[in-house]
Image: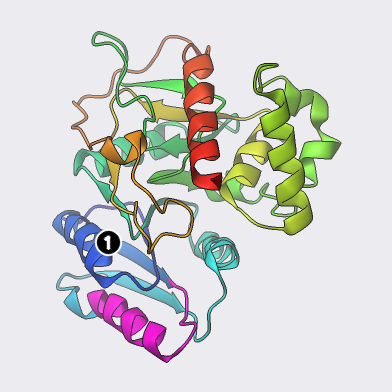
């Protein structure tokens, strides 16, 4: 029986990593699969892009396949944004993986369960598969709410939420009251310097996405255990070019049935914010 929630795979020029992620997707046989691919920068890059795209030929189940394959290099940010815009023109919700994010199989059921459970809850805008803390103490619910959804290494959302995304980062200046409520004084300068840098240079899509969640008084979900391993810490990466403590986080199994939290209070935000800042500083050096 096929998995009935749309799955999105974003690829570029890393065929070996793409194959690892695809091999997990193949096990759940999604009934709808979207493949977004950036195009090559040059002739040598084209060969790698072509190799990565051969995963399409390895689909051996009955699937509604849609592809959005660029003939030229758009860059990580424009390709991700335009690709997801296209996805949400076609479906109401989706589970999203990049070519270096290898999920545990339970990631898909976790996302699918919560996409359905919170389908009409406009406050909930993002479901993470990645837990930057690795896991929270046993005995707690299956997930918790957080204002910090970075980094989005394996995630899910709805059309209703994504349509509020503003890639220009104007939101951080227009909605300062809502945004400043979610960042600590300790890390205030790092956040605001980053926001302004992204606004001026028009780079990055994940921090702007978190900013727009704040601007719209939204909230994200993070699993109690990390469900996604990022294998992209090397010279091929756009940002994560060197291994660090975050590259050592492994994908664990989510236990079912899901236990829902009794409150939406963001209990772990101080720790998550500190880890996000550490990651942000690491990838910028």
Q: Is residue 98 left or right of residue 199?
A: left
Give the residue displayed 26% in from the left and 69% down from the top.
63
Task: Based on the picture, tell me whether residue 142 belongs to the magenta stretch.
Answer: no
Give the residue displayed 69% in from the left and 41% down from the top.
194
The percent coordinates of residue 188 (x first, y second) are 71, 24
The kind of secondary structure the magenta stretch mainly shows is helix
Task: Give above or below for 237 relative to 254.
Answer: below
| Residue situated in front as seen by the camera: 253 or 229 | 229
The chosen color scheme is rainbow
Task: Based on the picture, tell me whether residue 48 belongs to the magenta stretch.
Answer: yes
Q: Quadrant of the C terminus?
A: top right
Give the residue displayed 37% in from the left and 30% down from the top.
131
User: On the image, which quarter does residue 141 sit in?
Assistant: top left
User: On the image, which quarter does residue 78 sit in?
Assistant: bottom right
Which residue in the structure is indicated by mark 1?
31
Judged from this view, the residue extending furthest toward the bottom is: 43
Residue 119 in sight here:
no
Q: Quadrant of the N terminus?
A: bottom left
Disc 1 residue crowd, few under 14, some 14–19, many 20+, Cα 10 Å:
some
| Residue situated in front as seen by the camera: 241 or 129 | 241
Q: Secondary structure at mark 1?
A: loop
Question: Which contiguous range is marked in magenta?
Answer: 37-56
Task: Give above or below for 119 relative to 146.
Answer: below
Q: Is residue 250 left or right of residue 181?
A: left
Task: Give above or below for 140 relative to 42.
Answer: above
The percent coordinates of residue 77 (x first, y second) are 58, 61
User: On the image, which quarter does residue 33 sit in?
Assistant: bottom left
Residue 281 in sight here:
yes
Task: Give above or below for 206 relative to 249.
Answer: below
The percent coordinates of residue 82 (x first, y second) are 58, 67
């Amino acid at each position: 029986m096929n998995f009935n929630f749309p799955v999105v795979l974003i690829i570029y020029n890393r065929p070996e990593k793409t194959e690892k992620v695809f091999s997990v997707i193949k096990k759940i046989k999604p009934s709808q699969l979207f493949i977004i691919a950036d195009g090559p920068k040059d002739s040598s890059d084209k060969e790698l892009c072509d190799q990565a795209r051969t995963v399409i030929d390895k689909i051996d189940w009955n699937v509604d396949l849609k592809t959005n394959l660029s003939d030229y290099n758009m860059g990580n940010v424009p390709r991700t944004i335009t690709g997801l815009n296209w996805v949400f023109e076609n479906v109401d919700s989706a589970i999203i993986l990049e070519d270096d994010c290898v999920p545990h199989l339970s990631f898909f059921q976790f996302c699918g369960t919560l996409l359905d459970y919170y389908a009409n809850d406009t406050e909930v805008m993002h479901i993470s598969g990645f837990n930057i803390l690795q896991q929270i103490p046993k005995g707690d619910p299956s997930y918790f709410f957080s204002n910090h959804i970075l980094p989005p290494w394996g995630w899910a959302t709805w059309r209703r939420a994504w349509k509020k995304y503003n890639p220009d980062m104007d939101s951080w200046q227009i909605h300062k009251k809502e945004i400043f409520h979610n960042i600590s004084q300790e890390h205030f300068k790092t956040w605001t310097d980053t926001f302004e840098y992204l606004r001026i240079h028009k780079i990055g899509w994940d921090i702007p996405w978190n900013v727009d969640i704040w601007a719209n008084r939204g909230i994200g979900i993070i699993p109690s255990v990390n469900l996604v391993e990022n294998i992209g810490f090397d010279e091929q990466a756009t940002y994560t070019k060197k291994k660090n403590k975050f590259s050592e986080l492994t994908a664990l199994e989510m236990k079912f049935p899901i236990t829902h939290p009794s409150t939406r209070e963001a209990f772990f935000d101080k720790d998550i914010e500190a880890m996000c800042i550490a990651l942000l500083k690491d990838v910028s050096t």
